[in-house]
Amino acid sequence: MAMANKAKLEALLTLINTSARDAIALYEQYGDVPAIDQMEPHPLDNAVDQTALKSAIRTLEGACAQICATLAPPSHTAINLVQVYDHACVRVVARERVSDILLKYPKGLHVNELAKKINVEPKKLARIMRLLATRGCYNEVEMDVFANNRLSLILLDEHPVKYMILLHVESTAKGATVFYETLKDPRIAYSYEQTAAPVMYAINKDGTEGTAFDLIARDDNQRKCYNTAMRGLNRIMGSLAVLTHFPFEKYSTVVDVGGGIGAFSLPLAKMHKNVKITIHDLPEPLAQARDIWVRECPEALAENRVEFDDLNFFEQVPVKGKDIYYLRNIIHNWDDHESTIILSNIRKALGPNSRVLIHDYVLCQLSRKQAVIEASEFGVVSAPEPLLANFGVGNMRSYQQDMTMLFVYNAKERTLQDFLALATAARLKLEKVWDLAESCVLEYSAA
C-alpha cells in the first residue's frame, strides 16, 4: 500500500512537471516567460483563446493542491481552508484605487505616502499590502515600499475584471456571512426564490427588497459595475475562446439571448463579419448597449449586422428561425423551473437546423466512473489519474462560482446530468459539449 501511495505521488509530480512545461512553452510562443514581479502584462494575458493555457493550469493547480493536501499535516490544510482574508484586503485596495495610484510610481511608493493619499492608517495598510504581495499581487520592492506588478494591474479602474472582483468582495461576501442562517431559517431554508437568496437575507431579512437583479436595476452605478463585470467574465472564464473553437463561419445568424451590452456580441461582430446578430434583452441594458456599439463597433451598425430587440425571456419567444441561439451565463442565474421556461420559449423559435448554445460552467463529477462515461459520450474532459476525476482544485472556481450563484440568486451551476434533465424538460437534444478548459459550451438541437 505504501508503495502504491508513493507511486501516486510520483505520478502527481510528473503531472506538475509536464503541465508546467506546457504552460512555459505557451508563454514562450508569445515572448518571454513572465516573472512574478513583472511590471507589465504578458502578451498571452490578453489572448482571445487561452484554452491550451487554461488546460495546462487546470492540471497544474489540481496536482499541486492534491500533493500538498496529501503531504501536509491535516490540521495545517484544514485551517488554510478558513483562515483566508484575501477578499477583505482586496476590497480595500480596489475601493481605494491603489493600483491606479501606484501607476505613477513605477519604482514603488512608501506605505506612509500611500496611506496619506487614501486616508488609511499606515501600519494597517502595510499589513494589507504585505499579505497581498505574499500572494503575488503587488511587489514589496524594499521594506514598506510597494509597486504594481502584472497581477495588481488587474485592479486598475480600466480593467473589467476589477468590477467582477468588486461584486464578489461587496455584495457576495455579505451573503456568505449569513449563509448558515439561511439554511436554518424555517421561513426560507427550503426556498429557491431569488428573494430568499443569502445576499437579500443579509440586506433585508423581510425580503421586501426584491432580488439582486432589482437592486442592480434601481442603481445606475451598480448597473454600470455589473455590465462591466460581465465583460470581465470573458477574461476570467476565457469565454471568448468560443469564437475560435465553434465554427461561426458556417452560420449567418446569431441571437444573443440576454446579451446585455454585448460582452459576447461585440467581439463576435469584430471577428465574424459574416454573422448578423440579434441582441435580446430588457429595454434598460439595450439602451446602454446602443451607446456602447456606437463607440466600439459603429461599422456593424452601419452595415446592419446587429439589431437590438426587447425581450422578456420568461414571457416572450425570441426572433424565430435563426441559426444560433446563444446564452452565456444566463441559465446559471435561475432555478430549474425558471430555466425550463426560458429554454422552452427558445425551443418555440427554433428552425429544423437551429442550434442552442448554453455557455456556462459544467460541474464535473468526482466519480471516476461517471467522468469516464461523460467523456466518452459527450466529450467532457476528465482528469488524468491519479488526479481527482474533476481536476480537484484545478476546477475549483466552478464550484466557488456555484456557491456565488447560491448566495446571490438562490441559483446554481449545473452538472452535465442537470443539463440533460433541463434539455428533456424543454424538448432539446444535447448534441455536443465543447470543453474550453474552464467553461463549456453545450450545443443543443430541437428534440
Image (cartoon, rainbow, N blue to C red):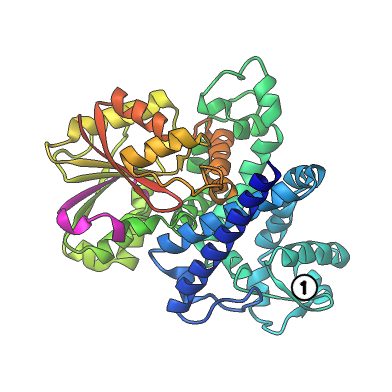
Q: Would you say 231 lies left or right of 252 here?
A: right
> Is residue 351 inside the magenta stretch?
no
Residue placed farthest to the top in the image?
Answer: 186
At a point 54% along the width and 53% down the height, the residue shown is 164
Residue visible at 46% across and 57% down in the picture: 55
Front residue of this view, candidates 4 and 287:
4
Q: Give the crowd class for mark 1: few <14, some 14-19, many >=20 residues within 10 Å.
A: many
- Describe residue 68's horizontal placement relative to residue 231 as left or right: right
Residue bearing mark 1: 114
**Residue 170: x, y in percent?**
64, 47
Report the side of 173 relative to 315 (left or right).
right
As drawn, the residue found furthest toward the right would be 123
Instruction: Quarter of the image for the C terminus: give it.
Output: top left
Q: For the point 68% across and 19% down, which residue is it? A: 185
Q: Is residue 254 magenta?
A: yes
Residue placed at 30% from the left, 57% from the top?
A: 245
Q: Amino acid at mark 1?
A: Leu
Measured as percent of width and height from the top left, residue 362 is found at 44, 41
Q: Is residue 126 left or right of residue 33?
A: right
Task: In the rendered view, tell whether residue 229 sits above or below residue 432.
Answer: below
In the image, residue 322 sits, relative to residue 424, either above or below, namely below
Q: Position of residue 319 (x, y in %)?
A: 19, 40
Q: Is residue 159 visible?
A: yes
| Image quadrant containing the N terminus | top right
Q: Which residues are magenta?
A: 244-260
